[in-house]
Amino acid sequence: KICESSGESLVSCEGECCSVFHMECLGLKSMPDEKFICTECKNGEHTCFSCKLPGKDVKRCSVNMCGKFYHEACVRKFATALFESRGFRCPQHCCTACSMDKDIHKASKGRMVRCFRCPIAYHSGDGCIAAGSLFVSSHILICSNHSKRNHSSSAVNVGFCFVCARGGKLLCCESCPASFHPECLNIEMPEGCWNCNDCKAGKKLRYKQIVWVKLGNYRQVCWWWPAEICNPRSVPLNIQGLKHDIGDFPVFFFGSHDYYWVHQGRVFPYVEGDKSFAEGQTSINKTFKKALEEAAKRFQELKAQRESKEALEIERNSRKPPPYKHIKSNKVIGKVQIQVADLSEIPRCNCKPSDENPCGLESECLNRMLQYECHPQVCPAGERCQNQCFTKRLYPDAEIIKTDRRGWGLRTKRSIKKGEFVNEYVGELIDEEECRLRIKRAHENSVTNFYMLTVTKDRIIDAGPKGNYSRFMNHSCNPNCETQKWTVNGDIRVGLFALCDIPAGMELTFNYNLDCLGNGRTECHCGAENCSGFLGVRPKTAFATANEEKVKNAKLKQKKRKIKTEQKQMHEDNCFQCGDGGELVMCDKKDCPKAYHLLCLNLTQPPFGKWECPWHQCDICSNPAVSFCEFCPHSFCKDHEKGALVASALDGRLCCSAHD
């Protein structure tokens, strides 16, 4: 860490930094007998690996043997940093070159070669490493950013605009040969030093890249000479021995077949069609003409190799879904918290262990009606309780499949009943600020697949980097599943439930109800008869015309205005169950005046959110009721109302069998 060189007699710090030192650099004559801890680890003041300023406000990378520390503001400047529930993975665990190429899945995979001086890392091999980097060992290098050469004084700029290929008054980059007309970039002529967008973004030249070089004798009148950037280890020994510095790299000149060391300030990339670079010039000699032909041929060879490699990788990736980390429960990121309720606060249902299916799908479990999951220590049904699907992860068997036009999907292996729990939507639990940062980063990297689902205003599940099989469920305008928000042990979680009976072998889908950001719309390929054509657009109905929709919307608006002017809804003063007064819970359904004691509802605390009383659900099947007893909360649906209610002697008001 002190002299930046390898060798023997190295001693490792056993503190948090994992640094290695020469004994001579530490002033030690022999290996320490006890555990060695460096000064920074003893004091607790580590240096930020990015800005090189020490302090106690720095945070350590979450990767075990990394040992790099950063200010949070410093590490957030790097698009290659990855924030997780336990902290962050620093940029040295993600390939800078792949990140520049927008290949974010490949960027964090494979063996890395890391810069010793800054948070830069590349995949090992000529395909990613920046030309001009100096290898210290097989996995450590000093990247070309640390060149001692002053590129602003040695850059040789071209005499034409990189956009329109014409001359004139040009704006020249201080770090590379690029030149532009200010009007071609839609900017004013800046004052002082200026760098092009590629140099600002840190884009570097790579080995086996065809370039144009400006160097002494290797130019023809005003033309640059074509060459290929070579790895220093592949050039002749006498060329390796020539004087050069960090940031310099050898090039092989086409035509003359000579080598020389150059730097980024004298090189710019060759592109397809540059063979016609000097067409019409009569003073071109045979060597330069030969160089143009060799460069064009070599360019096509490298292009074919690259396309073949990409095609092989695409074919290999098409056999399995894009990589993600499979998790079983939500993982918290940043300031988001998972709520945990006290046992005394968890509602108790009225089911019994002797019931046929206690707390089951067709039971009258109050918790299930209110979308609360029973707690094993609170539920009267005990071990027989069937309302613990989230906690026990009782998912029907499913498999990931490849669809025709919608990428990957999820298919059930067994039949699923209507209302049955299908899966929980899990992922990283993030807040709105982190969500916006991820969306921004995704747009910058040309990512088009999103897995974000809103739970509450400031809690969002992102199943992109981490999730379970539910992340593969596709959208449909006529879905067979729906999302429901359930309270599980005091925390709100999202489950997917069957909307209808689903046979084995059927693909599982739900309506994304997508909120589109900006003007872009994603085309829908669900294939349903009522398909709206785009995600986020309401599906078509069988009978509604455009005019009917307008009339319907107008009526809805009128109703909303009317609601605002109406007086506050009045509720009864006595409990509808027992008839006594006291502290009551009010029904939130419009025009329902009923109120209840918590004990009469078998609840220990008021229900969360908008709540409808039991009077509106059928006593037998829990479907919406159409016939109501006017003396107690008993009610019945259309299928079960026959014979359930009779007219009483009190003005003919309907009553159930519980009353005389």
Image (cartoon, rainbow, N blue to C red):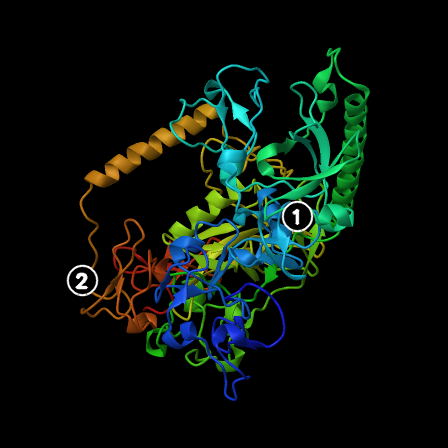
Is residue 216 something that shows in the picture?
yes
Secondary structure under the numbered disc 2 in the rendered image: loop
Amino acid on which disc 2 is placed: Asp
- In this picture, is 493 found above or below 14? above
User: Which quarter of the picture shows residue 496?
Assistant: bottom right
Q: Residue at x 64, y 19 (%)?
A: 222
- Residue shown at 81%/35% (left/top)? 301
Looking at the picture, does residue 495 appear above or below residue 34?
A: above
Q: How many marks?
A: 2
Relative to 64, 658 lies left or right: left
Return the residue at label 1. Answer: 128
Q: Is residue 640 visible in the rendered structure shown here?
A: no
- Left or right? Give the position of 305 relative to 269: right
Q: Residues within 10 Å of mark 2 (few under 14, many from 20)?
A: some
Query: Residue 573 — which label?
Result: 2
Q: Which quadrant of the structure image shows residue 65?
A: bottom right
**Marked residue nearer the N-terminal end (2 or 1):** 1
- In the rendered structure, the answer to whether residue 137 lies left or right of residue 336 reads right
Q: Position of residue 577 (x, y in %)?
A: 29, 68
Q: Nearer the viewer, residue 54 or 512?
A: 54
Left or right for 357, reference 572: right
Query: Looking at the image, which residue is at 79% across and 32% down?
Result: 300
What is the distance, in whole Å, between disc 2 and disc 1 at their CAs?
75 Å
- Picture coordinates of residue 491, whole percent (x, y): 40, 66
